[in-house]
Image (cartoon, rainbow, N blue to C red):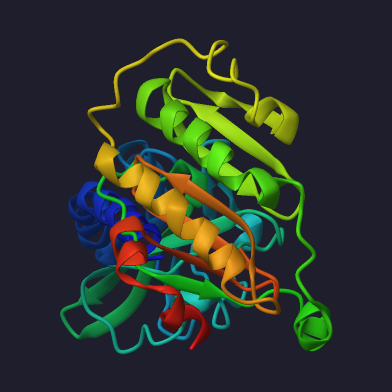
Amino acid sequence: MAWFNDTIFLRKTALAERLERPMADLAGRCAPAWNEPGRLDQSLVDTLPLLPHCRVLYALNSAGTQVSANVSPEGADPARRGQDLSTRPYLAGALPFRGFGLSHPYTGRNGISPCITALQAVHSATGPLGFVAADFDVKELPPAPVTTALHTDWHQYRGDPAIREMVFQQRRIPSVMDEHTDTVITRLDVLVREHGVFHSKIHLSSSRAVLWLYDDPYHYRLHTLAELIDPTMCLPYPKRPYPEEATLPPELVRPVLEQLKTLRRADETIYLRSASLNIMNSLVRLTFSCDGSHYLPAEEFLRRDASFWFG
């Protein structure tokens, strides 16, 4: 999703802002010591404290051969000098290269932790010498600025192929909830608008619902149909004003729920099995009998009638 890629970009940008100056300074100190391993290693040791969260710092020549020790918070390990790093992901497309850059995240040699490498070109008066490289664990990247502006573009995902292949051999069997849909819609509308439920998931085929409360978002409440249609259903949920942070206007909650009922009954072969509504990001999720799922903004959902979904 766009917000996911944007967050990664922001975290990489924050890291680059911290590293660009000290890495450039390090390259300047490494150039005259390039052919003197002791001096070269000492330059790396002196710079490591200026690179917060750096896992390992080292130098390699233009052919991808490491020419320094591995310098980490635990000290310098000269045993790594001479190893061939030419196939490492961060060197792809790096030559010819001038200046500073960050690699894309890649899987480290341990095969578990995702890494990112900062590369700074090192030049002498006669031409390029190689690079200094700093490896970081992705988990240690500076946090991105907090934002609630999540993108809610429409996304569609295919489900289980075995279910899709059999979809035209099945028919909708009315559930117990289908007999009480209007009552369930009324209960959920009140719970969302007046009792602090910000996320609700409705299982239309199996006649249950799962609710998340604004004031207790880490626990969900699972309700059977008998509870959902009970006149006292709202009593365990204290009254609460509609969240100011919600991006879905409260007057659109019931129209969204009513539209779910329409999609449930519009076709006997392709029908809605479950759905969810989140008022904080105004996102609707739909899962149909073919096991395909859609995630789309609620207002866009309301603009589409049954003919859009079923032709």
Q: Is residue 81 visible?
A: no
Q: Position of residue 48 (x, y in %)?
A: 38, 42
* Residue name at image x 76 percent, y 75 percent: 160
Can you tell which quarter of the image residue 75 is in?
top right
In the image, 147 versus 98, the foreground residue is 147
Where residue 262 appears, x then y in whole percent?
51, 63
Q: Residue at x 36, y 15 (%)?
A: 240
Observer able to see residue 80: yes
Place of residue 230 in the rendered image (x, y in percent of width and height, measured from the top left): 65, 23
Compared with 71, 122 (above or below) is: below
Whole-percent x, y for residue 138 in the image: 49, 51
Picture quarter with the N terminus: bottom left
Q: Nearer the viewer, residue 200 or 19?
A: 200
Q: Is residue 304 above or below residue 180?
A: below
Left or right, 25 with respect to 310, comes to left
Say whether residue 40 is left or right of residue 156.
left
How many numbered discs? Answer: 0
Question: Above or below — where is 208 with respect to 79?
Answer: above
